Image: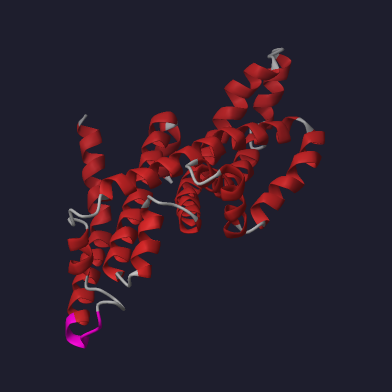
Amino acid sequence: MLASVREIIKRTHGALPAVLVFIGGIIAWEVAIDILKVPEFLIPAPSKAFLQLVNRNINWPYHFWVTAYETLAGFAVAAVFGITTAYMIVHYRWLNQLFYPYVLLAQIVPKVAVAPLFFIWFGFGELPKILVAFLVAFFPIIIDTTVGLKAADPDMLDLMRILGASPYKTFIRVKLPAALPHIFASFKVAITLAVIGAVIAEFVGAERGLGFMIVRAQSHFRTDQVFASLFLLVVLGIALFLGLVLMERLAIPWYAKMKRLE
């Protein structure tokens, strides 16, 4: 318990410089806006943007939750399909030749161009936004998981074959543990991309969510509300990223310890 407390204190001290830089930047921004008399419709003072977060005429928690739900749903679908596809690519070579070109094609096609089609095909509900978030997050999960599954120790694989282990046991006891660091690394990239995908979809067509709030505020030249929405998007992205970091430490504590020793 004492070691855990010390670790938390150590990491808090490590984050202190970044926090101080952030606070200093906000103060400098506020002072610069006041001195230079920049019009509010161009760049608002941070205080004006933060005041919008307590504006009772805007249901910020609701819009925040909508974007968070679309992000998490798209990420969850991407995680399931990404890991499954990576497994099939590694273990069935003919599927690698069949699937990989389409996986690459899905990554190359601009998501902004695909989003309007999803709204035409599936309406203006949550599904098109989840699909865009899924498409954006799908590719890094497949790539990193494939690399991780191929990174298993050859000696351990030979040992499992000598012991007559089934492919399932070999996967669970050797390949999956070796792939978990790569999988969580892909998750941390994919979750931030899923936020971007959800917002892109909300730009195209939505009546709620933080992306919708940005578009609406932009049409009224309310840059203070735009910056308030951007702040909440940053909070959402950081919270989801840190949640995955915590999950990684709980799922593979040995890997976290190994990184600290490096």
Q: Quadrant of residue 52?
A: bottom left
Up-down relation of residue 141 to residue 214 (above or below): above
Query: Which residue corresponds to the image point at 21% horizontal and 81% vertical from the top-left?
Result: 32
Q: Mark yes or no: residue 136 visible.
A: yes
Instruction: Name the quadrant containing residue 248.
Output: top left
The colouring scheme, among rainbow, by chain, secondary structure or one colour, is: secondary structure
- In the image, residue 169 lies at what x, y percent? 63, 17
Q: Position of residue 123 (x, y in %)?
A: 54, 45
Q: Is residue 154 left or right of residue 29?
A: right
Q: 143 and 252: which one is in front?
A: 143
Instruction: From the top left corner, tell me how far across and down residue 99 is, in percent.
Output: 75, 40
Q: Nearer the viewer, residue 119 or 50?
A: 119
In the rendered image, residue 36 lying in the magenta stretch gets the answer yes
The quarter in which the N terminus is drawn is top left
- Residue 150 location (% of width, % of height): 67, 37
Tell me the residue at 59%/48% (across/down): 118
Tell me the residue at 74%/44% (across/down).
Answer: 100
Q: Which residues are magenta?
A: 34-39
Question: Is 137 rendered above or below residue 95?
Answer: below
In the image, 34: left or right of 178? left
